[in-house]
Image: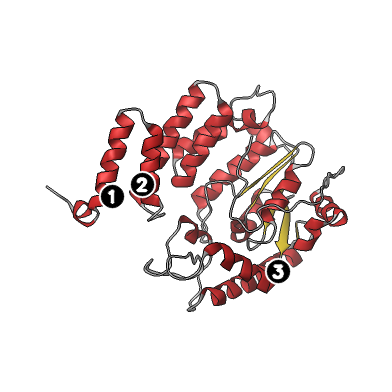
Amino acid sequence: MRNDTDIENPGENRIQAEVHRALLEGQVDVALELLNSILSRDPCNAAARARAAQIFLRIGQYLDGQHNLSEAYRAYLRALVYQPDMGEAQTRLLEILPACLNSDGHRGGLPDSESLNAGGQLVIGIGTGRCGSTSLARLLSMQEDSYVGHEHPPILPWECDQSRFEFHCRRLKTMLSVKAFSGDVAHWWLPYLPRLLVQFPNIRVICMQRERQATIRSFNNIKGKGKGSANHWISHDGEYWTRTPWDECYPKYDVRTRDLALGLYWDEYYAAAINLAHEYPSNIAIFDISLLGTISGQERILEFCGYSDPVTSVPLTLNKGTIADGIFVA
């Protein structure tokens, strides 16, 4: 008997059958290409995302068995991109993380509880986005005995998700047991800062700020124009704006245009950041994006984080005019 899904999505149902056949024949690349054909039309398609996550989980397990931990980590990471709450990928990713961070690779499991409570300095970068976040992550990772990622999966929803937050805390503590400085840079950390301050009382938070109109223009340039473009800041039915997995990572505003929503987002984001910086001046500081373009500016940022022998580089601009991110590159 045919169900509603078969009737409503016959083309998608056919592709899923082809995916299944490709996997039975060991043609993993073909299966992923077929799934991508669904996701290119509907990035939030739950069935296609779940199947892609399972494929990357199996790839990770195979590479794991071959002791190729770095590539296995990347595969588990891709699984979490498609299915953020996949427990199997989360667990194994944490287990092999220390070995991936250590060049000698001698540690393949989680550190013990004592070492998790020790460790180094946590550094978190925030900002609306389109404000130098990729460049900031690069600058922080250039420092000796330091690794700071950029938008490391799984994504964190704007409305706090305790389960994903706890996974990220476990990951950050694991990193801090290996590196003197560790962290992540992503706009989504702002609503989680009160929780992070409880977990990591000595945290350093770098908030990058770009001029309001320049931020709006930059978002508009990368999110597209007209029907089919992305709008993460307005709740919509997907008829005009395209739904994307990133929609959950931003607040929503009851306005008609993306420009208005972006303006409100910028206003509220930095109002909240300024209030937190006033409340926790030793933990949180706001820096203008222009500082990333000068040696003295980079030194100011690194000094606040606690780096005693800062490494600087000009030019440093990354991700200009693109939406590329800098997830784990070990």
Q: Which residue lies at the image location 42% right of the left edge and 41% below the top edge?
A: 53
Which numbered mark, 2 or 3, is in the foreground of this view? 2
Determine crowd level at label 2: few under 14, some 14-19, many 20+ residues with C-alpha closer than 10 A: many
* Closer to us: 248 or 122: 248
Q: Which residue lies at the image location 25% right of the left edge and 47% below the top edge?
A: 13
Q: Which mark is residue 48?
A: 2
Q: Write down the residue under mark 3.
A: 275
Determine crowd level at label 1: few under 14, some 14-19, many 20+ residues with C-alpha closer than 10 A: some
Q: Which residue lies at the image location 60% right of the left edge and 33% below the top edge?
A: 97
Q: What is the basis of the colouring in this image?
A: secondary structure
> Looking at numbered disc 1 in the image, what kind of residue is underneath it?
Glu
Residue 210 in the image, given as x and y percentages of width and height: 71, 66
Residue 106 in the image, given as x and y percentages of width and height: 66, 21
Which numbered mark, 1 or 3, is in the foreground of this view? 1
Q: Find numbered disc 2 in the image and state the secondary structure of the residue it sits on.
A: helix
Compared with 320, 174 (above or below) is above
> Looking at numbered disc 2 in the image, what kind of residue is underneath it?
Ala
Q: Is 222 situated left or right of 241 in this image?
A: right
Which numbered mark, 1 or 2, is in the foreground of this view? 1
